[in-house]
Structure formats: structure tokens, C-alpha cells
Amino acid sequence: MEQESFKVYRYRWVILMAFMLVVIVNQLLWITFAPITGSAAAFYGVSDLGIGLLSMSFMIVYIFVSIPASWVIDTYGFRTAVSIGAVLTGVFGFTRGLWASNYTLVLLSQIGIAVGQPFILNAVTKVAARWFPLGERATATGFGSLAMYVGIIAGMAVTPFLVIHSGIQDMLFVYGSIAIVSAVLFVILAREHPPTPACPPGQEERSLVFDGLRQSLHKRNFILLMIIFFIGLGVFNAVTTWIEDILRPRGFTITQAGMAGGLMVIGGIAGAAILSTLSDRYRRRVPFIMLALAVSSLGLLGITYATSYWFLLVSAFVMGFFLLSAGPIGFQYGAEIAYPAPEGTSTGLLLLTGQISGIAFIFGMDLYKSPSTGSMTLSLLGLTVLMIVSLYLATRLSESSLLTGTQPEDALS
């Protein structure tokens, strides 16, 4: 198919699907314990925070591995990097299943899977840039990010069901086996480059990785976007990690907590598909980011106070639809405003900020929960205020010059 003097290839969809499968499995393994915090704490004989550490280990490891992973992505290509992440996910996902009865060995396996995560997630915009034209990249990034949400919803919805019917050990072994299969498929199917670049001549050029870091951090729009990701992704990481603890004081069961978390991500899947496509169609990023932050704040407020199950589910869906849809649009916007910084570098910086805030928000929510009832209402209100702050910052963003064709004017003096 000819498009503006360059060619795109149908095999790009095979590449994207293979990548999405690896992302799904990695995120499934990350969120496994969130909807079964109480049951897992009883099984392993540890505190709720000890189970939270199994999820939080991903955020801690990400801080140290993100920039090296981005360097590998931008130096050796996404196929090499994602293959590293997929193999780590497969191997340690399988050992987690083998050692499922031992908390310490499960934690070590979680850390091994966590090392693989940035090699996978940081590559989403690189996959889009390698194989997709500019007019399809937010859509491709949206589908790559959608895979994150599919993995999370699988963990939220399926894990409680498997634990109730088969137990924690069998559930972990099943997940580990799936991880091995996904790694093998990616290594077989992935290709680094199409036969010819999927963009006009010259647009495939990129600066060196550390030059890209410096360039990105000297752009006002990118710094504002990092702060927005710090808040938005941190809120998502904290709410999903503590979803059962948030709802347990109000009498919701682990199955209901898992369904609420799952519906939040179902909303995110719908939002990522719809809003990313609209963003490409109208060639605008900023208005969609603003809309997402505004409405997701209302959804978070609903989760904070919901006492009826139906209202909880509606609030979770609204929050997920808008907050999670901001992710892929934000990743693509970040890649565009950071250009010519490599895509792995810009995506890695944005994800890194969210992992740092996720750790802080998770500890903060545990620290400030009510000692008598376990309620996290105060913390959730604080997160809602931060979301409103992020909305204000989004109003200060200017549109991507790659889309508008204007000269970028956001460099810091």
C-alpha cells in the first residue's frame, strides 16, 4: 500500500500482535496478587503490605532498569530488547509457579519478571515508529497500551476465580506456563525493520540515547507531561495495587473487588481504542489528554465513596475509560514532542515517573489508612486533588508540532 511516497506492510499487524501478547502476560504476572491480597497474606503468613510488595517490586525494579532498558531498545532495537524481557518473564514466571508455596522464592521470581518489564513496556512507541506511519502511530501505541490493560483485567478478573477453584499454587503454575509460550512466539515472529521505512525519508533519524534524555528534559511540554504521568500513572498503580484493601472495609468481597478492578481496565481498553483512534483522526493530542484527566477524576471520586455495587462498577468503568486512555495518547504525544529523541527514551522517562510515584502513593495509602477500620478514604481524596492538579497542568500543554506542522516553541531557556 503506497502512502505519501513510502510503503507500509501488512506484517506490521503480526508484529504488533506478538508484542501485545508479551505485554499482556507480563502485566498479568505483575497484578496477580492485587485482587487476592487478604487470601495471599493468609496463605503465605505475611502482612497485606508484604503482599503489596509483590506488586510494588515491579515499580522499585523499574526505577533502576528503565534507562538501561531504553538504551538497549534504542541501540539494539525493540526485537532484541523485548526478547530479553519476554524470556525473563517466561523463565521467572515459570519458576514462580514451581516455587509457589514459598513466599521468599515467589518474591525473587517477581523481581526477575520485574527486570524484564521495562524491556517490554518501554518499546511500545518504538514498535509503532518502526512499522507504522505517523497517522497510525497513536492507534498502534493505543493497541500496545491496550495490551497492558488486557493483562491487568485478566489478573483482576481471572485470578480470584482460579484461586477459589484451584488454589494459589495451581494458579501461579498456569500463569507461568502461559508466560513461556508467549516468549517463544515473540522470538519466532518478531522482526526489527520492515523492508523499507514506514515514514518519509529523514523522519527515521534519531539522536543518541543520552542526547535524547538531555533534549527531552529541556522541553517545557515534556516536563509538564512527566508531571502529569507522575500523578496519573501513580494513581493507577496505587489504586490497582490496593483495590481489595480499598473496598474491603465497605463489605465488598474479593470477587467484587476483582470485578471492579477488571471493569476499570475494560473501560481502559474501550477508551484506549476509541480515544486513540479519534486522536489520530483529528490529529490532536492535548484536548484528549485534558478530557481524560477531567472525567477520570470524577470516576476516582466515585470509587472513593461507593457503597453500592452497581455504583462502584460504574465509577470503576468511568475512571478506567478515561484515565487509561490518556496513557497511549500521552506516550505518542511524548514521542512527538521529544523528537528527535528516541522513542524508547521518551516512553521510558514517562513510565519511570509513574513507577516512582506509584511506590510513594502505595506506601502513603498504607500509612494513612484508618487504624480502626482500614479505610483509605483520606488517601483517595488526596489522589483526587492531585488528579485535578494534573488537569490544570494539561491546560498548559501545546500541541505536537509534528502534527500541526509548526515550529516547536517549548524549549526551556
Image (cartoon, grey):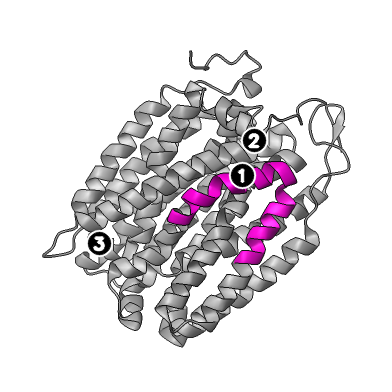
Contact between marks 3 and 1 (CB within 8 A): the answer is no
The amino acid pointed to by label 1 is: Ser
Query: Is 228 placed left or right of 23 in the picture?
Result: left
Residue 173 drawn above or below residue 155: below
Q: Write down the residue under mark 3.
A: 308
Task: Let me know if residue 318 appears in the view.
Answer: no
Quadrant assignment, res 246: bottom left
The boundaries of the magenta stretch are 60-88
> From mark 2 to mark 1, how far is it between C-alphas?
8 Å
Query: Residue at position x 55%, y 13% from top?
Result: 409
Residue that mark 1 sits on: 70
User: Residue at image x 47%, y 33%?
Assistant: 289
Q: Looking at the image, is mark 3 or mark 1 earlier in the sequence?
A: 1
Could you tell whether 269 is left or right of 191 in the image? Answer: left
The local secondary structure at tag 1 comes to helix
Q: Residue at x 47, y 84 (%)?
A: 169
Instruction: Give the residue at mark 2.
Output: 209
Task: Report helix, strand or loop for mark 2.
Answer: helix
How many residues crowd around disc 1 within 10 Å: few (fewer than 14), some, or many (20 or more)? many
Residue 209 x %, y %: 64, 35
Q: What secondary structure prevails in the magenta region?
A: helix
> Residue 366 location in percent, x, y?
25, 58
Q: Amino acid at mark 3?
A: Ser
